[in-house]
Amino acid sequence: MRPELVVPRLSVAASLRAAATAPGWDAHEAYRGAADLDDEGFERWIAALLADTRDGAARPDGFVPSTNLWWVQGREYLGRVQVRHRLTPHLRELGGHIGYWVAPAVRRRGHATAMLAAALPVAQQLGIECALVTCDVDNVGSRRAIERNGGLFADRRGSKLRFWVPTG
């Protein structure tokens, strides 16, 4: 079975909880409490992730609607992708349209490249013709994933490298 990009689902909860307690877990703050959620709490969290796609959904100031997807292999959680529907001035500088994260236990296996490739059609469906994708200056693996997906280097802004990646 090949990994695939899916809508967040309860069926991978056990794997995500295990990953969240593993050494090296450095996921986005929204994922840090995942290990402590029971199934009911996990379902509420998933509902909030899914609601984030709607324009009118509650979100912190400066945040935009986003499509949140998980990279899974069967019931194993491998990582996540967030496709932001539009850019704010802050996202234009440091965040971009697409953010992705791979669980530490499965890094350096091509997952970032494959996840980004799978996310590009999602961005295209949202009307994004060329996605801004950023990475830290010292994150060689992420830079390679972006370049392997056709990313064209735009510039460096502080500690971030910025690339434009065609979605079609």
Image: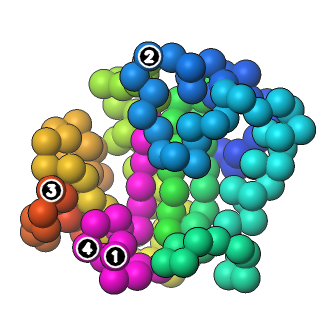
Q: Amino acid at mark 1?
A: His
Q: Quadrant of the N terminus?
A: top right
69 with respect to 116 (left or right): right
Q: Which residue is mark 1?
A: 90
Q: Give percent across and percent down for residue 125.
A: 56, 73
Q: Which element is circle 2 on? A: loop
The label number, if any, that marks residue 159 in the structure image: 3
Q: Give percent across and percent down for residue 8.
A: 70, 45
Q: Residue at x 75, y 48 (%)?
A: 45
For the residues labelled 3 and 2, the Cα–Cα distance comes to: 25 Å
Q: Is residue 87 magenta?
A: yes
Q: Give percent across and percent down for residue 129.
A: 39, 78
Mark 3 or mark 4: name the one nearer the start of the chain.
4
The stretch in magenta equals 86-102
Callout count? 4
Dot 2 crowding, Cα within 10 Å, few <14, some 14–19, many 20+: few
73 with respect to 28 (left or right): right
Q: Which residue is mark 4?
A: 93
The label number, if any, that marks residue 23 in the structure image: 2
Dot 1 crowding, Cα within 10 Å, few <14, some 14–19, many 20+: few
Q: Amino acid at mark 4?
A: Glu
Q: Residue at x 47, y 39 (%)?
A: 27
Q: Are marks 2 and 1 in contact (CB under 8 Å)?
A: no
Q: Is residue 156 magenta?
A: no
